[in-house]
Image (tube, helix red, strand yellow):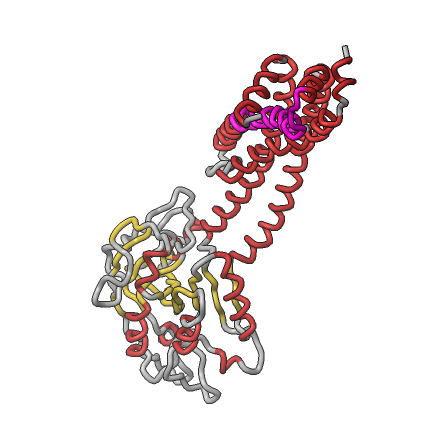
Amino acid sequence: MKFLDLLRMSSSNLWKRKVRTILTVLGVVIGVASIVVMVSLGLGLSRSLIAQYESWGSLTRITVYEPWGGDNVEDMRLDDDLVREIESLEHVESVWPILQMSALAKYGSYQGWLQIRALPKEAYPEMNIEVGEGRLPGEDDELTFFYGNTVLQDFYNAKGGGGYYWETGILPDIDLMNDPIFIIFDTDAYWQSQYTDENGQNTPPPKKYMIPACGVEATMEDSWSQYGWYTHCDIEQLIPQLQKIFKNKVIPGQPTTKTGKPYKEIFYNQLTVNVDELDNVMEVQNYLTNLGYEAHSNAEWVQSEQQTMATIQLVLGGIGAVSLFVAAIGITNTMMMSIYERTKEIGVMKVLGCDLRNIRSLFLMEAGFIGLIGGVIGLILSFILSGVINKLAEAAQEYASGISYIPIWLVLLSLVFAILVGMVAGFFPARRAMKLSPLAAIRNE
């Protein structure tokens, strides 16, 4: 018997018993929809979690610090040699040295502390900083500052006209982009100049510098930004300026020799290591940790949370699988009833010399058809339910990216799984049909 004949006969037999077929298919629909929706909830939660971590910083970036304590700290500084060593590692795309320091800013009666954060100019376009006015650092020939959107909150009226922003709720009247703001880098000398020594002499005040602004970060709706507290600049422009200002003196934040003298080399506060893929982050991070450095990344948290989410997905998928198991029992019952009703038909087929494998294939195809039809309708229902769930989640403003996510692999896997469940459920009835005695089947009423 040809395959097309088997296909036509199996579909025709199902159509003859419409009510029973529809009820059996309905069980598969509920089972498939349950599994797909349950697994999609787990996938959606996992995707939302990753999106949340990405909003805090790239998942493929590792932050490296000097080791905390120990006798060999002086041999493990973050310097250019270490940068070159890390850049040569497999899976590492780039390394950004970061130099941080504090400086005092003054404008009229206002003054405030700036948290200066210098990076290579090529790093800023990849940091997703939203520019509100001007441009990012590094595009000018001289040192310029890019102010974060909460820098103004660190200014106050030094002449007693008001406190900080968190005390008054009022920002100082300063235009960071256009007002002439003077920067004092040598803050130790500045505070010493405010008081007289034991001989009644005043220390000469340090020089003030007017660093032009290249841009200001856009103000966020919730007034918070990952880089909002920092004053950004190009590290290659800041280092020569600091070396000029603190000639033969210790730059604030830099280590000193055992005799208290400054090093000739500039050491960085931290390094940002950019890895090519998330799967390779922990490999590079473990290498840096084994060297003795402090290395941290969001991938640590993601890996832990993904394991938790995988467990949740298994639990949710198991709950949905119970429905499909019940549907499989329904398919088995339907096929067994079909065999009892078609016993004489099976006997005639055997007497006419029909191959036993064709009889088995006929019943397996009928069971597979039930799984296929139920799987397709179940998937359509799953997409409808997923859309409704996502709309409700968005309305509640809990998950902007959606709480239910159905990838293409889940669609294909669930469809194949539904067909396999149908065929497995129909396997034993098909074997029973094969073993029926032809003469006994023909005499059956």
Asked if the stretch drawn in magenta spans residue 359, the answer is yes
Q: Position of residue 362 (x, y in %)?
A: 62, 25
Predominant SS along the magenta part: helix
Is residue 190 positioned above or below 443 on the image?
A: below
Residue 153, percent across and down?
Answer: 39, 53
Residue 317 drawn at (x, y percent): 63, 37
Residue 422 is at least partly visible in this image: no
Please identify the quadrant where the N terminus is shown.
top right
Taking the image as shown, residue 197 lies to the left or right of residue 330, namely left
**Position of residue 159 in the picture relative to residue 48 (left or right):** left
| Magenta stretch encompasses residue 279 | no
**In this picture, is 31 found above or below 125?**
above
Residue drawn at x 61%, y 17% is 13
- Tell me the residue at 52%/57% (across/down): 299
Quadrant of residue 115 in the image?
A: bottom left
Q: Residue furthest left?
A: 141
Q: Is residue 359 left or right of residue 54?
A: right
Q: Nearer the viewer, residue 400 or 387?
A: 387
**Residue, far bottom:** 259
Identify the image quadrant of the C terminus.
Answer: top right
Can residue 339 be seen here? The reply is yes
Which range is magenta? 352-380
Q: Taking 320 as reference, is 239 above or below it?
A: below
The residue nearer to you, when weighing 22 against 431, is 431
Please state which of residues 299 and 193 is positioned toward the viewer in this rendering: 299
Position in image of residue 340 (x %, y %)? 74, 17
Count up the numbered dots: 0
Q: Tell which residue pokes out farthest to the top in this image.
A: 445
Q: Quadrant of residue 371 in the image?
A: top right
